[in-house]
Image: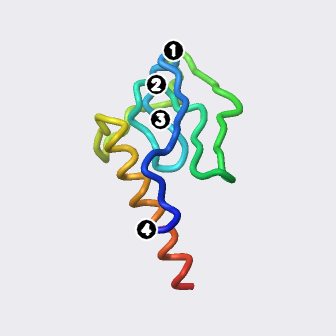
Amino acid sequence: MRGLRSTIPAWFSKEIPYYFGPLEFNGLPGLILELKLNPKQTIYCTSVQLQSKNNKLLTKPTVGKHIESLAALNKIAQEVMHQKRNKQTKK
């Protein structure tokens, strides 16, 4: 398929042990701080605000599935990008 990449580079920090990231990307062994979707589109984390255990800002998801590998994350990312392109071309 034209325009799809086999991998999506992601920078994450194991020192921030939260398995979250931008958009639908998550499941790496640390917070995703940068995600390069394509040569012209990169998402950056510009700040991180952690709360005390008594006042949690982040909570563990109760729905969805844990992504075990980067290969699985890349596959999901490709599917999401393909779906978004299909929606844009149907408009």
Q: Earlier in the sequence, mark 4 or mark 2?
A: 4
The residue where tag 2 is placed is 30
Q: Are marks 4 and 2 in contact (CB under 8 Å)?
A: no
Q: Earlier in the sequence, mark 2 or mark 3?
A: 3
Question: Which residue is located at x 49 percent, y 30 percent?
Answer: 58
Percent coordinates x, y for residue 19 in the rendering: 43, 30
Structural distance between the alpha carbons of marks 1 and 2: 7 Å
Mark 4 vs mark 1: in front: 4
Q: Tell me: residue 15, above or below residue 35.
A: above
* Nearest the eye: 55 or 35: 35
Structural distance between the alpha carbons of marks 4 and 3: 28 Å
Q: Are marks 1 and 3 in contact (CB under 8 Å)?
A: no
Structural distance between the alpha carbons of marks 2 and 3: 7 Å
Of the 4 image quadrants, the one containing the C terminus is: bottom right
Type of residue at label 3? Phe
Structural distance between the alpha carbons of marks 1 and 3: 13 Å
Disc 4 secondary structure class: loop
Question: Which residue is located at x 59 percent, y 21 percent?
Answer: 50
The residue where tag 4 is placed is 1
Q: Tell me: residue 54, above or below residue 75.
A: above
Type of residue at label 2? Gly
Type of residue at label 4? Met
Disc number for residue 15: 1
Q: Earlier in the sequence, mark 1 or mark 2?
A: 1
The residue where tag 3 is placed is 20
Type of residue at label 1? Glu
Q: Earlier in the sequence, mark 4 or mark 3?
A: 4
